[in-house]
Image (cartoon, helix red, strand yellow):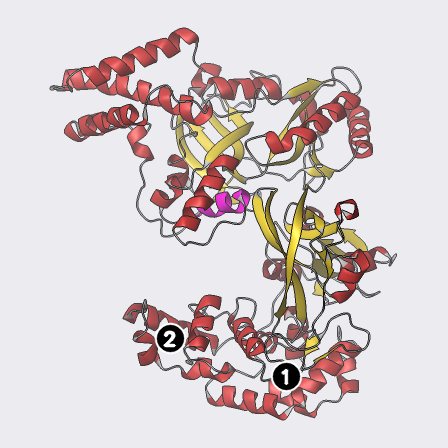
Amino acid sequence: MYTAAQEREYLDLSHRLLASPIAQNQEAADKEVSDLRDAIKYHDWRYYVQSEAVVSDYDYDQLFKRLKQIEANYPALQTPDSPTQRVAQGLTEEFVAVEHNLPMLSLDNSYNEEDLTEFDNRLRKLVGNEGIEYCVEPKFDGSSIAIVYENDLMVRAATRGDGVMGEDITNNAKVIKSIPLRAEFSKYGIVKAEVRGEVVIRNEVFAEMNEKRREQGLKTFQNSRNTASGALRLKDSAEVARRGLEAVIYQIGYAIDKDGNNVLGRGLKTHFESIETLHKLGFNAPVKEIGLYPTIPQVVAHVGNWEEKRNAYPIEIDGMVIKLNDYQKQQETGSTAHHPRWAIAFKFKARQAQSILERVEFQVGRTGAVTPVAKITPVPLAGVTISSISLHNEDFILEKDIKIGDTVVVERAGDVIPYIAGVVTTTRTGAETAIDFPRECPSCNSTLVKPEGEAIWRCVNIECPVQQEERVIHFVSKGAMDIDGLGKDIVKRFMAEGIINQLEDIYQLDYDRILALEGWKAKSVANLKVGIEASKNHPLWRLITALGIRHIGATTAKVLAKKVGSALDFENWTQEQLMEVDEVGPKVAESVYEFFHTEANIELLKKLKELGVNIETQLEEVVPANNKLDGKSFLFTGTLTKFTRDEAQALVEQNGGKLISGVSKNLDYLVAGPGAGSKLTKAQSLPTVQVIDEDAFLEMIG
């Protein structure tokens, strides 16, 4: 953006400004404000884009304070693109939905050379062989953002949202100093542009942030991607400024001239030319990282080089993006409803690390399931530090021959879920010891049982303290009764204090006693009371889900809730009757039958009813907005990255589809995210089940 001569000029200007007295009249102030803005803009570019400061923090602060003082003395000189306008704008009450100038489509994915070759063949059939050139650039693992400039000024920033509509986060984007408040698009005949990129946190910054949080006794952040995404939607932009965000801008998605004509393909001929233009305009654009190649073998070699050096790159990347460079050819190939045909993402393999298995802890869940958890020497992997990994069950441990003291290979499925992929047996010394799976509950010392046909050992003592706590935590959770103000940590504290001992205690809390606890004020107690009262009116399916019946999730709970007038009706149902209900198989029928034929559970339901909790069916049902999925059944598994599980299931119902709870011949589509396990394996063995990813599902509903 700046020549060597310009850099010397702005550095000299900075020193002159710092050495001179502040302007004392409006004419002098007008000139000084302009100089200060130019100097600060240069230093922001140098520090936040080039990652190298040429003045001390103190000198930069003095320049900034000087500009603020002059603008305070002469308010008419303040402009929207002044560096002082990056300051926090106070609390944002809500994020308004806004429409992107063009949809922000997803990318088709590839995982090997064959996928890229097929992509190349498809494109050559569409546009011919002449003039084919590919731009290859890193796929940054952050949170997508679209920024609009009109007449050179930044006027709006939005999240990706659903690709068509995003959330307006302009105030938060203004405090990200790698985003210019003013960019001279007019030099290129552009009066309105929408640039797109990823908001990221550098690995070094993320590590320092977590170290400070550890020192302060605060919970550390899981990974930089989620931290960046969450920061963009914080209501306090002052807190956003403290999160160390920066924006990497990798595309001009939309650009028009004064007559409303598209500039891409005319004024700007290629994608690489637009990246160079962004760099010249002061954006943090990946010019140096881009490779230009005419053939796929060259692309594959470039991708391979980057996969080898990804760990050394200062920002998290999870793949490479391959794009047709020529804009005219991009327009010829067009797009599907889901992705552009002229681009594809190559996803890197799961990253691995090695660590030492120090010990194994056994945790008891709300259904009594005892899960072994490996405690390993903390190891950084894919942007997070991993110290705990589920070992699933005893069979998993025996199958992989895992021992305490072993060097284990750790992976993250989809760079999300950590798991032990294997053991490095060549490092064994003989000092390793077998993992002894307990036969008594770690919480209550009751004898564990292993039901026939299952791999999991369970504690069947209904009075088990840990199970009681986990049941209450599940009951109040978002997917169950969704009680606002009663989260996991609060439940644990209330149970430790004896305020909650069993589920029904939630609806007969001693609020005076809570008010006496440290950290509780009248307003927080009032909010808790409102949240609990609101939960009494939830539909029956939420209560059925919240009761924690084995094998019953929200999908099956909704099916069951529609079959009765009251939850107590199930007391009179037989297992045979339950088996006649869609989505209810032998295991589910047995579990439901046992629950509703246990006297303590019936008494619990009656008590909840006395306390005002709805246990009856409400007639309101989901009315499909359309029938795009009519007659099709869906199941979601693995980690969902585009939407939550509740949102996914709601989308199926809103589009006339049907949700089922297990993989069977009745399933049409399994939507599998990263980390999908046994359900995916089973689905792949059934020829009638189609396995798709989240993007394909979104394409189905448009």
Answer with the quarter of the image where residue 191 lies: top left
Q: Position of residue 37 (x, y in %)?
A: 30, 21
Indicate the quadrant containing the N terminus: top left, top right, bottom left or bottom right. Answer: top left
The one of 682 and 94 positioned closer to us in this rendering: 682
Q: Which one is closest to the eye, mark 1 or mark 2?
A: 1
The one of 56 and 647 positioned closer to us in this rendering: 56
Residue at (23% x, 16% y) in the render: 17
Q: Helix, strand or loop at disc 1?
A: loop
Q: Position of residue 616 (x, y in %)?
A: 57, 84
Q: Earlier in the sequence, mark 1 or mark 2?
A: 1
Q: Which residue is labeled 2 in the image?
A: 529
Q: Position of residue 570 (x, y in %)?
A: 67, 87
Three-letter code, disc 1: Asn
Q: Is residue 328 left or right of residue 685?
A: left
- Examine the rendering and report whether any part of residue 674 can be seen: yes
Question: Which segment is the magenta one?
Answer: 224-234
The one of 598 and 492 positioned closer to us in this rendering: 492
Q: Which residue is labeled 1 in the image?
A: 461
Residue 372, compared with residue 348, is above or below; it is: below
Residue at (86% x, 59% y) in the render: 686
Q: How many marks?
A: 2
